[in-house]
Image (tube, grey):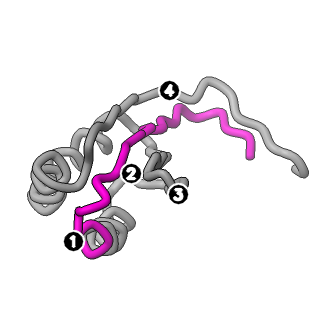
Amino acid sequence: MQTNNAQYVVVFTSILNPDAEAYHQWGKQMESLVVQQPGYISHKSFRNPEGLGVTLSYWESLEAIRFWHTNTQHQQAQAYGKKEAYLEYTIEVCEIKRAYSFPN
């Protein structure tokens, strides 16, 4: 993957509350919603057995990220996450300056 256009990645790192019963349901809802968002490119998620997780979501613009952040259903999921799902989390928004992969 090589890119000349500006792209952005949102790095969402979290520690999951093991008692968050509705977490996977909310996750499935958000996954089906985010793929419909203008400017969304892709995402990848990883979680280890201790509950530490990382989701990388790729976007065409900062405006697209802001639009997703203010989506009503996403805001409901955020509220659930803050109240029940996560023990802690960090969000970082980064501009991708260069990208390359092997094999091309």
Where does label 3 land, which residue? Answer: 49
Could you say which quadrant of the image residue 69 lies in? top left
Residue 88, located in which quarter of the rendered image?
Answer: top left
Q: Position of residue 61 (x, y in %)?
A: 39, 37
Look at the image and say whether residue 101 sits in the magenta stretch. no
**Which residue lies under the disc numbered 1?**
22
Q: Amino acid at mark 2?
A: Gly
In magenta, the rendered stretch is 1-25
Tell which tag, 3 or 2, sits nearer the viewer. Answer: 3
Q: Are marks 3 and 2 in contact (CB under 8 Å)?
A: no
Q: CA distance from mark 3 to mark 1?
A: 18 Å
Q: What crowding class fits label 4: few (fewer than 14 Cα within 10 Å), some (14-19), or many (20 or more)?
A: some
Q: Where 49 falls versus 61 (above or below)?
A: below
Q: Amino acid at mark 4?
A: Glu
Q: Which mark is residue 39?
A: 2
Residue type at numbered disc 1: Ala
Residue that badge 4 annotates: 95
